[in-house]
Amino acid sequence: MTGSTDIVEGCDLQFQPPDRTPDQLDGLRVLVLGLGRHGGGTDLILFLVSHGATVSISEDAPEKQLATSLAKLEGIDLHRKTFGGHCSEDLDACDWVVVNPAIKPSTPFLEEIAARGLRAVTEMGLALSWLPSKHLAAITGTNGKSTTCVLAGRMLEESGKRVSVGGNLGGSLLAELDRPDPQRRYVVEISSFQAERLEQGGSRPRIVSVTNLSPDHLDWHGNESRYFAAKQRLLEPSKEVDAVAILPTGAPFGTGFSCPHRKVIRCGDEGESRQEDGVLSVSSPDGEKISIPYHPSLALEGPAGSMNALHAATIATHLGATVEGISHAIETFPGLPHRYQDLGEIDGVRFIDDSKATSPESASAALARSDAPVHWLCGGKPKGSDLVALADFARERNLHAYCFGAVQQQLYEALIQGGLGDDRLQRHPDLETAFAAALKCARTGEVVLLSPGFASFDQYSCFEERGDHFQQLVEGWNKSRAPSCAGDGGHR
């Protein structure tokens, strides 16, 4: 699959737009396929039930693993609940099947949905179909999309605009339909999983930002071309006449890339929006340049932070934000949990939680932010990414690597082949043992950095749980250490 069709690899399931409006859901029979362990589908279910739909859920996971999600649905009358595997009877007398983004294209049950000719939709597809597109911006990309999304929202808030932020970042925007506000702005993060399942010819946001693009999630998409095509589906035509595409200057969106149905604004060196001499020069809706003072908070320092700020400022400008609002949001932005989150220093050693770094590229960006020696905690579940560039980058940095999790051996071998000496490498079964090893080596002025570069699903349910575990380890060590444990010089 190239991404230009709705056919999911391995089956003939086609995703479609809703065939009714939110006020026509009474009596609609809906199967929600994939509830999620952290309440990802609960907002959707609550919205459907509140509008009169008859809802069933089907989950491959056992019921005991879904306690968090099910607690949010306590008291809600559900028609059927299936756990521990999907059941054909759930499709009987069913009008819609809402497929969770995490459901892999190779899932056999999708074949049966396709064979029955049922209408397959997604929560994101519903939101984009029903929310007003004029004041809606969608953000996608391999790295930085969550930070860009939240930062753009803060810029609008600081400018006095009413704004809702959601999507892949967390929380459904469907509830906004119950409080219509023609002046409200919507900033939506969209993952590659969500983008690939957008229906052909469906509603597209007026403003689309792609922060960057590099191979990721190849275990889900199957290959690099499908992953890239999924991201680019958001750039399809919008019904709004002044549609905008905010793109990076690098490949594959260089000068040779064509997007005739959208005005293209590129962010970066030589782009229409760029940083220069302490100022963000941002392309406005009328094509004029707006100069915004750039005094970044700690969370936005470094090349990755400035690019996130540039994309966010361009988005916010096209949604009506002011120079003052944008500038103040940049200066005061605290960052997001588990995104290069500074946990402070203990005995002169700084601890940073970058658990959200689930690709080699995002780990490289984190490593580039520190000039101090780094004790790099890396590993997790592989996603099919090429490790050559990461290994080459690591070789040039002043670091020790502590590989853990399912990918530990593969990562260790890649780093060795890339030229990182064996004396700078260790392998560990899990994060806890890797952390303990890093503590034995770290000295005053150095950094212990969790920036895994891989998914968390080998040992955790999500990257947040992995980051929380790291923070607990830091806190536990801080409480238990004796004063004599302070680093006193001497480096390995």
Image (cartoon, rainbow, N blue to C red):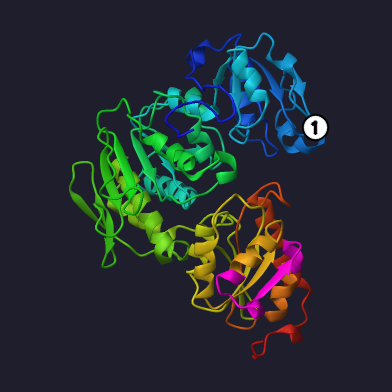
Q: Nearer the viewer, residue 134 or 261?
A: 261
Residue 158 vertical position relative to residue 91 in the rendered view, above or below:
below
In which quarter of the view is residue 484 placed?
Answer: bottom right
Type of residue at label 1?
Glu
Question: Residue farthest to the right?
Answer: 64
Which residue is located at x 54 percent, y 67 percent? 391
Could you tell whether 238 is left or right of 337 in the image? left
Viewer can see residue 13: yes
Could you tell whether 85 is left or right of 149 in the image? right
In which quarter of the view is residue 268 placed?
Answer: bottom left
Q: Nearer the viewer, residue 18 or 331?
A: 18
Residue 81 spot, x, y in % from top left: 76, 22
Which residue is located at x 62 percent, y 34 percent? 104
Residue 490 spot, x, y in % from top left: 65, 91
Residue span colored magenta: 416-433
Residue 38 vertical position relative to residue 32 in the rendered view, above or below:
below
Question: Residue farthest to the front?
Answer: 417
Quarter of the image with the C terminus in it = bottom right
Give the crowd class for mark 1: few <14, some 14-19, many >=20 residues within 10 Å.
Answer: some
Could you tell whether 201 is left or right of 376 in the image? left
Viewer can see residue 188: no
Tally of marks:
1
Which residue is located at x 23 percent, y 41 percent? 285
SS of the residue under disc 1? helix
Which residue is located at x 46 percent, y 25 percent? 199
Magenta run includes residue 418:
yes
Residue 176 spot, x, y in % from top left: 49, 28
Residue 288 spot, x, y in % from top left: 17, 48
Q: Nearer the viewer, residue 104 or 244?
A: 104
Magenta run includes residue 363:
no
According to the image, label 1 marks what residue? 63
